[in-house]
Image (cartoon, helix red, strand yellow):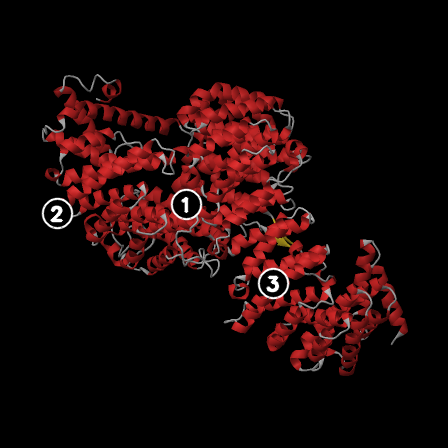
Amino acid sequence: MDQQYLSSLEETLKLITVPDSAVIKAASAKLSSEFYNNDLALPTMVHILQNHQDAQIRQLAAVEARKLVISKWATANAGMKTQIRDSILKSTFVEPKKLVRHQSARVVATIADIDVPENQWPLLMEGLVGAATSEDVQSKEMGLYILLTLLETSGAILIEHVNVFLGLFSQTLVDPSSKDARVTSLLALDVIASFADEMDEIPASMSATFKTAIPHMVNVLKDVVSQDDSDSAKQIFNVFNNLLLADSKIVGDSLVMLVQFMLEISLNTQVDVDYRVMALQFLISCVGYRKGKLSSKKLGPELMLAALKIASEEIDVDEELNTEDQENENEESDPVTLALRFMANLATELPVSQTITPLFENLNAFLSSSNQFEKRAALLALGVTSSGAPDYYSTQLPKLIPVIVSGLKDNSLVVRVAALRCLGQMTSELQDVIAEYHAELLPLIIAIIDSATNVNVYKSATYALDALIEFMNHEVMGQYMEPLMNKLFHMLQSAQSATLKSAIVSAIGSTAYASGKIFTPYFAQSIQFLEPFIANAGNTEGLSEPEIELRACTFENISTMARAVGSEPFAPYATPLLEAAHLSVNSSNSRIRESGFAFIHNMAKVYGKEFAPFLESIIPKIFECLQQDEFQFNPEDLENEELDEADLAEKFTVHTGITIEKEIASIALSELAMGCGNDFGTYVEPSLTILMDQVENSYGMREAALNACWKIVDAMLAANTTPKSFPIGAPQGSYVSESLLAIIKPVRALSMATLDAEFEIGMVATILDNITDLLKKYGAIIVTDNGDSEELQQLCECLMMLLKKEHPCQVEDEDMPEDEEDASETEAMMVETALEVLVSFSKTLGNDFNQIFPPFKEIIFAQVTASTKNLRVSACGALADIAAGLKDYNQDVEAMMNAFVDRLTHDKSIDVKGNASYGVGLIIESTSQDVSAAYPHILQLLSKLLSKADKKADSDNEETRDVVNRAFANASGCVARMALKHQAAVPLTHILPALFSHLPLETAFEENSPIFRLIMSLYEQNSLDITPFTPQVVALFAEVFKKENARIKLVSEATLGREEGVERLNQFASPEEKVKVIELLKYLDGKFAGVVSQNETLKAVI
């Protein structure tokens, strides 16, 4: 050994332990330049590892020796290799310091990774297994640890000795002599499980061994928790999290026991909070990855109630009420907060029967408790779970609103804040459905704001106010505007913090959004109040995060206000604000840039084609934004560190702010395309290129990018074709230009390629929703052209998988319950989305639909009689819509008719019966067959449906008012279609009184058309059956035109973009139908002595 070289190397290593980054950097550079190019480096470093007195130097020498083995072992002298192999194994076993032993073990594993596959260290495995089973505890622990490091390093070694390892670690997992041996054995089994996942077929013996081992693994965790060994506990929790991702054959039903134990830890307030947090995080992951097993074992109720109990634990009241920055801080470290997230996940992933139902059954006990924290938990639970089952919640509002109202009036401030948060979350999910209760809710929120002395009370109330206002009816807003705006201006003037100001600014924006043109008198004053917050728009130097958020929030909400009032009132402020937008998108701050893109998105809505001159300066900034990296990996000094997965994860940084910025930029880009039309044409190709790259490579905005692609397709087709005027059938050529087809095809191809193996439900829904929407507007060219049906066939295969619940986005594990009654609303939504595509096909493909429909018949007809109500509703409605789309091309008239009549006869759900009656009417209307012989039976069934719906109309039942009204509409439309087809077979003297007693329609206004046609037909015939009902006819059309006038007013006065759903409020199927109704009214006015003109509404009409 060269003593001078040894001494110099030791001195240099010592420098690396000095707490001075400059000294460490210089010493590291010296190691590389002066020592590591010498053949003595490796043996000398091993010598220091084995002999130096300072454990810190020995540990550092082990880290460096491992790197030297990687770079120098292949060319090292054979004799030296033998000497190092023999000595390092011995020294590792006798090293007194655990950390050094472990680092030394990694040197052994690195050498073995190179030598064992070449049979250069034949006795190693035998020696390690012997050590692992010896009586000496340190030898046992070290043997196991080296084997673990070997498994982590070399897959080849694992495959060769897998059965030996499994047997060994299953044995040492229960070794009573050493906790470290048990923990190491557990970690080793985790590595084996990860490799088992890569096997084509896991041997039955291996899966059996794992299932047997899992209870013992749980016992190891119990031991380390009871001994408060936090480091080992973290490792073991990570192992159990990994097992959630392993092949289900490895875990099997042992998962149930594992879940039970995690629940025990989560509920145990006597153990360290960190263990409870890790257990809850495991349970949250379990819901995501193993929901099938949880559902099939009916664990949902137990999990939901345990989470509710944890959420009801005592909290720091002062922090809850006064610590403004507290929100999200405790999300990952507080059991109470995690329990609420757990409940939200349960509600989203598991069936209502296993989550929401048990929650509701236990609510009263918590709400009636004298413990304010139990009341708080119940209210917050209602809020967080509403996102998982919004349809079900919307049916329960008559019961839930009194609960919220009571919470808002509670004596405890903590409970009132919980009620505010609950209201905010529920409004976010249920939107206008909950906003209908404004009269009960708004005064209570204002009262809390007026009396608030705690910052978080004020903030929570403002958020709830904001949420409620945003979804309030345009007409209703008129009665609130003056007091509401005065209140908001006063609040803004008195608010002290930037966070509170942001909440108030958002509420002003929501008021503008809800009220539309009614906001115009308050617009100038609002700008006056808000302008100071956006001065020097792009510069954020010296601003705190809340101040930056205030600036961004203000900028976004001013543009929302512009959408509300329109371009004329906004004109005086347009130039300076557009300049501010330019500064914002060039800011160095991501949140400010995001607000700039949101502003541009809204301006594109306000100005449309007039915004085209700005494209040249804006589009490049959007492209620049979209090409940002959303994540970065920081590999500095990796070669000088020994990193585990957690260390590596810390070096991987995801910039969620940039992801959100890119999402908003993509929305702005698509809105510019929609607004500017052909003026955007130059940017179509580069836009699609960048967006499609994001679909394939983005970390978090793939959905937004693909949605923007389809919106650009929509924009170009809208600018160059006439929507809803396309040839029916699969095009054998192309009925759009080559340039338009060149825009459609790449987006279609990317969508089909993505659909095939997509795991994200949201992404699948985005693709199918866009295809459905564009099929309705532009026809089959969206999915097929020039006789090439390959992508159409690919899409049909995907739809079939979705309907069978076999698509990758639906299959998380192999334990999904076969009982279809247990389905979450998310799962039902996916089936409904797939059916919507088929319905669109029926309307666009015409007779060609009959070529693709046969494979779907069996599954859809089966769903019509499924045990799940949601499936029956969707399938029955889809069949009816398919009948409407096909018209006389329908080849399944008899089968559909039988299915609809069967549901009318036997189904218990008004919703299903209503859809069935809709289907019956459409079949009768479109078929050339004479089905009048069935009329008496059908009319009897419709009468029973109306009778049942009448009883439910005023009920607090699960069947909502909307469902009842839809049943009225569908039954009425059905009767009208029957009479129009075979009038003689319908006893009008009995039918007309029942019909008029359920008019005017309150929803499903498309059913007005057959009713209007029947009325007009009877008057044309001078039928004596209709004459006695002339006053009812006049009253009906007076209400219809009131609604139509309100719709027209809404279109002209509502915030731009908010009127997009207004089409469903249209009272007439076409302008021609409206003209015919007006002609009828003129006729009736002449024939019946001014009966029509006496009505003020109709007088204006005629």
The residue shown at (63%, 70%) is: 170
Picture quarter with the N terminus: bottom right
Which is more toward the observer, 1013 or 1071?
Answer: 1013
Q: Which residue is mark 1?
A: 711
Select label 2 or label 1 by which is in front: 2
> Neighbour class for label 2 at 10 Å: few (<14), some, many (≥20)?
few
Q: Mark 2 or 1 closer to N-term? A: 1
Residue type, mark 1 in image: Lys
- Residue 930 — which label? 2
Residue type, mark 3 in image: Pro
Q: Which residue is mark 3?
A: 215
Callout 2: helix, strand or loop?
loop
Callout 1: helix, strand or loop?
helix
Which is more toward the observer, 621 or 196?
Answer: 196
**Alpha carbons under labels 3 and 2: distance apart:** 68 Å
Q: Mark 3 or 2 closer to N-term? A: 3
Picture quarter with the C terminus: top left
Residue 1010 visible to the viewer: yes
Residue type, mark 2 in image: Asp
